Amino acid sequence: MTYSVSQLEALFTNANEGFGPDASVQSALAALAQQDLAGAISDAQALTNALHIAPPADGSIGPNTPENTTDVALTVYQFFTGLAPTLAGLDFLVNGGGNPNDLDSAYYAGFNQANRYYNFALNLVSGNQAVATSFASTYGKVTFDQAVNAAYEAIVGTPNVGQAQAQAAIAAVEAQQPYFEQVAAERAPNVNQDLATKAIMVAYILEEGVKADVGYYASAIDQFGTELATGAAIPGETEGGVNILTGQPYMPLNVALVGGETVQGFASPGFTDVITGGGGHFVEAIGTINGGNTDVNFGGANDDVFIYSGTHNEITVTGTGFMIYDYSSGADTINVPNDYYSFLYAVGPGDFTINVGGTSDGEYGDDTIQLGTGLDTVSIAAGDQHVSIDLGHVPVSFAAPTTLAQASVDASKLDVISGLGASDYIFLPTAAAHDTLHLASNLAGVSGEALLATGTLAGGVFTLDATGHDALLTYDNGAGGFVSVVLAGAANEAAHASISSGVVTF
């Protein structure tokens, strides 16, 4: 499914509490619909981008969008009261009948996005006694810098951006204290100036986090906005409101690695976890890293990445010299678009899909892939040379060799490798100690030999066919069993393959 312009407009209007898009927003939504139709972005990305149309870069007012209507009310109330409004409360604050000062009113028409955040925060601190008391008890007894640190960790969080980026952001907010004091004096002269200044600082961090789409609050807003747009149930809503931080638990990671770290993945479909580093890091990734539909991008070089759990991790790596060990039992996908010297160990019981890309400058890929006990598929892009596939841990396919008369085998439970070319290698188990390789005219396994049969893979069945484009590698694993692996599209390469010390060279 792809979103049409009218569908995106309807979703936008739902998330914007009934505000339809103006001409400028309609143009932006039309562009997103076109990108979605062309496959340049996914449906999830189209919806996310429709709900995150940024305010004007120059700070001017701009059109009403979810970011300066719904998101303002949700985040400010969540922070200062501990609960975001109910759906009825959200209607009242954003576009509700009987509220002369909602975000659709003439009063707010002259407010840009930043000032909407400031005004909502000041109204709560000055007009709600319970909020004022709670805020004063937490932030009234600390210095401004301490308040910045506390607010930043609650709203964004160092684990989501990395230590270096968090420290830089906190320092930048601290440096704006004179500006926040000026706004407090102008907008709330009758409010305790220390608390007013800190309230504006909090509002600033809330707005910046949502605009940058990073941190705990931004993640919760992403989820809530999607639910609001599509009419899905809002989890955890009570008469008093909804805690969007616990009701919307997913958190896309955006971590800059400093040293050896453990990263806990939470991102749900539609988000991208980004983990970057300068290289030489030891990374442990636990949890389902991405909810099954988006990538984790590991950047840098010479990183060792260990994946221990999760039901559907999808990993994309950039840089060079990666070693990825996937011990999970899930159906994981590992993508290496244009990498050199990567070592991918799919050693867990899960069913893995491994995609390695060709090199863009004609040099060798030198990727090493070790397959595990699950049902694995490997796709090697054209141009990626010297790829090594280690079959040492692939389980037995047949307890006994197939028969000479057998014309086909069930390949639905066999590993499939596609894209093998000249200068690629397959490593057989050391226990097998094969020293002979034969082109086979049948599908029967032979003790002490590795056999390559030509045929066709279709519908999960490999059929013997002298004119086929595929090949079936069957070998005695040296421990009483026979293993078969489908080499899709490798019939021509099989014709000139050779073996030495258990290594098949194409």
Image: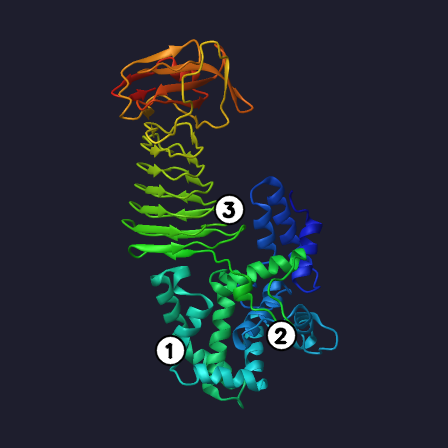
Is residue 25 visible in the rendered image? The answer is yes
Label 2 Cα crowd, 10 Å radius (few <14 / some 14-19 / many 20+): few
The quadrant where residue 473 appears: top left
Furthest-bottom residue in view?
A: 190
Answer with mark 2 or mark 3, whichever residue precedes in sequence. Answer: 2
Mark in the foreground, 3 or 1: 3
In the picture of the structure, the residue carrying the numbered disc 3 is 292
Furthest-right residue in view?
A: 97
Q: In which quarter of the image is the C terminus?
A: top left
Res 146 label: 1
Q: In the figure, is residue 341 to the left or right of 52? A: left
Relative to residue 15, is residue 379 depicted above or below?
A: above
Question: Between residues 214 and 343, which one lies in front from this camera angle?
Answer: 343
Relative to residue 260, is residue 439 depicted above or below?
A: above
Type of amino acid at the residue the image marks with label 2: Gly
Determine the secondary structure under disc 2.
Answer: loop
Is residue 54 visible in the rendered image? The answer is no
Q: Position of residue 315 (x, y in %)?
A: 42, 44
Q: Position of residue 74 (x, y in %)?
A: 58, 69
Q: In the figure, is residue 76 to the left or right of 314? A: right
Determine the secondary structure under disc 3.
Answer: loop
In the picture of the structure, the residue carrying the numbered disc 2 is 240
Q: Residue at x 64, y 52 (%)?
A: 29
Q: Residue at x 43, y 56 (%)?
A: 253
Answer with mark 1 or mark 2, whichever residue precedes in sequence. Answer: 1
Answer with mark 3 or mark 1, whichever residue precedes in sequence. Answer: 1
Label 1 Cα crowd, 10 Å radius (few <14 / some 14-19 / many 20+): few
Relative to residue 167, is residue 505 depicted above or below?
A: above
Label 3 Cα crowd, 10 Å radius (few <14 / some 14-19 / many 20+): many
Whole-angstrom CA distance, mark 1 to mark 2, is: 30 Å
Q: Where is residue 372 in the image (x, y as percent from the top left)?
A: 38, 34
Q: Quadrant of the N terminus?
A: top right
